Amino acid sequence: SPQRKLWAFSIFSPDTHLYFDAAFELFDMSKAFTKESDGDEDEDLGLPALPSGARNYMTPAGYARLRAELFGLIDDERPKVVEIVHWAASNGDRSENGDYIYGKKRLREIDRRIRFLTKRLEIAEVVDPAVHHGSDQVFFGSTVTYADALGTERTVTILGIDEADSLKGQGSWVSPIARTLLKAREGDELRLITPAGVMDIQVLQVSYPVPN
């Protein structure tokens, strides 16, 4: 039976004070189509750094979303691509076979993502932020509105490294803004250290999801 064996990176945005966290179990289903000696091996991507001894915190929704993606890749997309590669390989010269070359490339991408998702889910610690509903203190999973010295307001939701999307105003709990905000309360004045210098900010509002 197929063996499942579970791999991502970061860029600072001065506009949102967030880092863009990106990422990726090798699923040995058809080694013949993923490990050919064509000199194009899978490259292992570095995982986002976690503080020493820290856990990979994740919300229930984030965990469920990544788990669904993992099994979608394993049970649906990868078998389909393997079938395409198998078909393309039977059509002759592989060096000039576009379907074969693209299929091999897509398989490597899928396997990298599967490795990443498997490993990250294995070490995940699911934390429900709704338990803090009603609190004015910043913990994991909170949505925080803060203002800088000029009165410019920004809002960030503090999530896990593997689920945060900076384009949606989300930041990982190890990002500079999250580390500054964590444990603070509404009204607290803080100093945020960024690559552009030190900024004075004030916590305006803290909210959490409503418990189910």
Image (tube, helix red, strand yellow):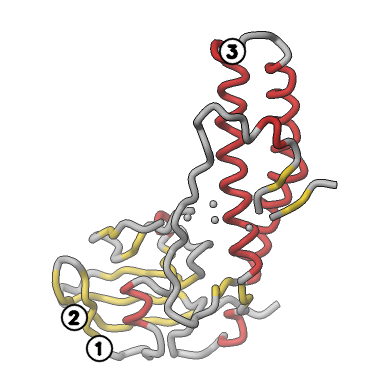
**Badge 1 amino acid:** Glu
The answer to whether the residue labelled 3 contacts the one labelled 2, judged by CB atoms less than 8 Å apart, is no
Looking at marks 1 and 3 on the same chain, the residue that comes earlier in the sequence is marked by 3
Residue sitting at x 31%, y 68%: 154
145 to 9, vertically: above or below: below
Does residue 120 appear to the left or right of 188 in the view shown?
right
**Residue at the right extreme, as displayed:** 1
The amino acid beneath tag 3 is Asn
**What residue is pinned by disc 1?**
189
Q: Which mark is residue 97?
A: 3
State the image coordinates of residue 24 (x, y, percent, origin top left): 54, 52
Give the CA distance from mark 2 to mark 1: 7 Å
Looking at the image, is mark 3 or mark 2 earlier in the sequence?
3
The residue depicted at 61 percent of the width and 81 percent of the height is 130
What's the amino acid at mark 2?
A: Asp
Secondary structure at numbered mark 3: loop
Secondary structure of the residue carrying numbered label 2: strand
**Badge 2 vs badge 1, beta-carbon distance below 8 Å:** yes
Residue 183 found in image quarter: bottom left
Between residues 74 and 61, which one lies in front from this camera angle? 74
CA distance for labels 1 and 3: 61 Å
For the point 54% across and 73% down, the residue is: 56
Label drawn at residue 200: 2
Q: Looking at the image, is mark 2 or mark 1 earlier in the sequence?
A: 1
Identify the secondary structure beneath mark 1. strand
